[in-house]
Image: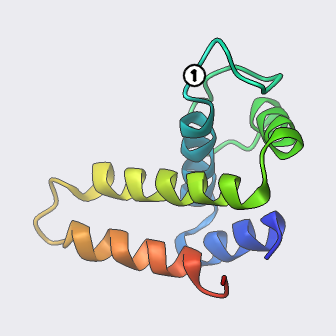
Amino acid sequence: MGILKFIREHILAVGKEQAIKDFQCGLNLLTGYKKETVLEEQVRLEEDADFGGKTFDMLKSALEYYPLEVIKEYIKTGASNNAVWETKDDTKIDTNEFVEEITNNLTEGEI
């Protein structure tokens, strides 16, 4: 599955704003905000749900240096990370179940 279809599927599952936040978080985790990184774009992305120039540049740079499967794994990790932080204090939501659901949604169709 290509990156655009992967992102599209995630948008359909969680909505545009949340999907972009998850994507931004995943890219931040991928770079680790390191000074020594192969990526040309080394900025920490604001996880603000705005797919602007910085997010686009970071994606473009990541696609040049990392295999697509690595980028997808970091997006999955970003989505799980966001799910934990956004639901951990909500007693009405089973955070573990929610994270598992997100992970399963992002894994469907992949081998």
At label 1, counting other C-alpha atoms closer than 10 Å, the crowd grade (few under 14, some 14-19, many 20 or more) is some
105 displayed left or right of 23: left
- The kind of residue on which mark 1 rests is Tyr
Horizontal and vertical percent for residue 48? 57, 38
Picture quarter with the C terminus:
bottom right
Front residue of 6 and 68: 68
Instruction: Place residue 91 in its image quadrant.
Output: bottom left
Front residue of 11 and 73: 73
Q: Is residue 92 above or below residue 81?
A: below
* Number of numbered callouts drawn: 1
24 displayed left or right of 87: right
Q: Residue at x 39, y 51 (%)?
A: 81
Horizontal and vertical percent for residue 63? 84, 46
Q: Residue at x 71, y 61 (%)?
A: 69
Q: Which residue is mark 1?
A: 33
Name the element at disc 1.
loop
85 displayed left or right of 21: left
Q: Residue at x 59, y 58 (%)?
A: 73
Horizontal and vertical percent for residue 78? 50, 51
Q: Is residue 26 above or below residue 61?
A: below
Picture quarter with the N terminus:
bottom right
Horizontal and vertical percent for residue 39? 78, 27
Instruction: Place residue 60 in its image quadrant.
Output: top right
